[in-house]
Amino acid sequence: MATLPPEPADEPVMPDANPKAPSPLSFPDYRYYWLARFTAVMATIAMVVVLGYQLYDTARTDYGMSIKEASFQLGLLGLFQFVPLAVLTPVAGWAADRFERRRVAIFSNLIDMVIAATLGWFTWSEGLTLPLLFGLAALHGVARVFSGPAMSAIAPNIVPPAVLPRAIAMSSIAWQSASVIGPAAGGLIYAAHPTSVYIFAVVLLAISAFTLTLVRPVLPPPAEVRRHPLREMVDGLQFVWTERFLLGTITLDLFAVILSGATAMLPVYARDILHVGSEGLGLLRAAPALGAAVVALGLSFRPIESNVGVKMLWAVVVFGLATVAFGLSTSVILSLAMLVLLGAADMFSVFVRGTLIQLNTPDHMRGRVSAASGLAISASNELGEMRAGAMAAALGPVSAVALGGAAAVGVTALWAWLFPELRRARTFEPQFKNSDR
């Protein structure tokens, strides 16, 4: 690899785009980053899946709640995770643009390690209560809000721009493959020995934190003038608001998943509809990630290059329709198949959206824009869980899931009309010119 000329100490050194090493994994820093992402995601998803099952089971067993009442508790679980995300997202984005990004990500891993250790202790001592579970879920929301922007902003600094679409796809493979293994492993370990799943999470989070220390320091981009932190936070939100293409891309996922997210209801389906228990819940949670991992693997070898906007919109439509079919299914095989399909469609949409956002954002704004995007994703997931829980309490879990999927299809059609820029996006090239670039 050719040697780059020395750069100032306060600027990140971009790896050389050597044509003999086109794969992101050719760069050592990216390999460490990939492993850190994989282990952290596997740990936290295994932990969150079991936490949701424990909360639903505690509500049904210890508090004597009905299916509808316990389903509403799952919705509240999403709300408790969302509140810290909503409050701290501007702070997290500013932190990712102001401080060394690896350290911010390691900090979030340490928070999750504390959560896993606490859950392990109270599971072992049989002292779990709904207030404790809600409180730890909120603390996990704090960890997530700092992890997302920092990790997203690292990747563009450790691979050249030409490799970034493949790097994003391979990062998605890390996420999705961990999302396949994590829930399945979590459910099986929990069924065999409940406390061990949290020991498993602590070990993986420690590995992730250590691996991040091996990545070359990713310093914040230099700025000619540093303004007040609150002003910089507002600048990030204003940037997204004034760029219609970014606004449409981010909010499409926000509203589609708020309306169609079925994840919160999976403990209900596992325990009381499909009757597959905690082991089955692990498989149900892993199924969307399996579909997503297959798509991500394909995209890492053959990324799409044309009509990216239209393909993203159709992927969201498929996601909604698969959600409807899952909601109405009473067959375990059909339910798993629909979850695989919706995961594949979601991954396709995530890949397009993530690449467009990264390549349409200047580096000095990436942390804050990633935070805004992360807030939209988290809002869609957590508020989607709240929406599903509230609808399940009123209409039952089946209606909550099926009607939500149908609504997502309608939102996609509306966004295609409101934001024609999405339909017109032919390639991943920047869709606008911004004076800050």
Image (cartoon, rainbow, N blue to C red):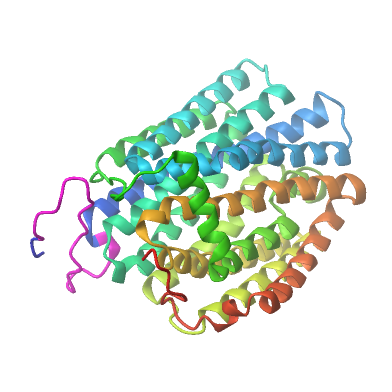
Which span of residues is magenta-colored? Answer: 4-25
Closer to the camera, 121 or 361?
Answer: 361
On the image, which quarter does residue 328 sit in? bottom right
On the image, which quarter does residue 161 sit in? bottom left
Q: Position of residue 368 (x, y in %)?
A: 46, 51
Left or right: 326 in relation to 146: right
Q: Position of residue 416 (x, y in %)?
A: 67, 77
Q: Position of residue 84 (x, y in %)?
A: 61, 36
Q: Residue at x 22, y 50 (%)?
A: 11
Against 62, is 216 above or below? below
Closer to the camera, 354 or 54?
Answer: 354
Q: Main secondary structure of the magenta part?
A: loop
Against 225, is 87 above or below? above
Q: Which image quarter holds the C terminus?
A: bottom left
Give the number of marks: 0
Q: Is residue 19 magenta?
A: yes
Residue 291: tell me if it is visible.
Answer: no
Left or right: 197 in relation to 54: left
Closer to the camera, 84 or 68?
Answer: 84
Q: Residue at x 49, y 83 (%)?
A: 426
Q: Position of residue 182 (x, y in %)?
A: 52, 45
Residue 419: tell me if it is visible.
Answer: yes
Q: Which image quarter holds the N terminus?
A: bottom left
Q: Residue at x 47, y 76 (%)?
A: 431
Q: Residue at x 20, y 54 (%)?
A: 13
Q: Is residue 409 magenta?
A: no
Against 45, is 411 above or below? below
On the image, which quarter does residue 156 sit in? bottom left
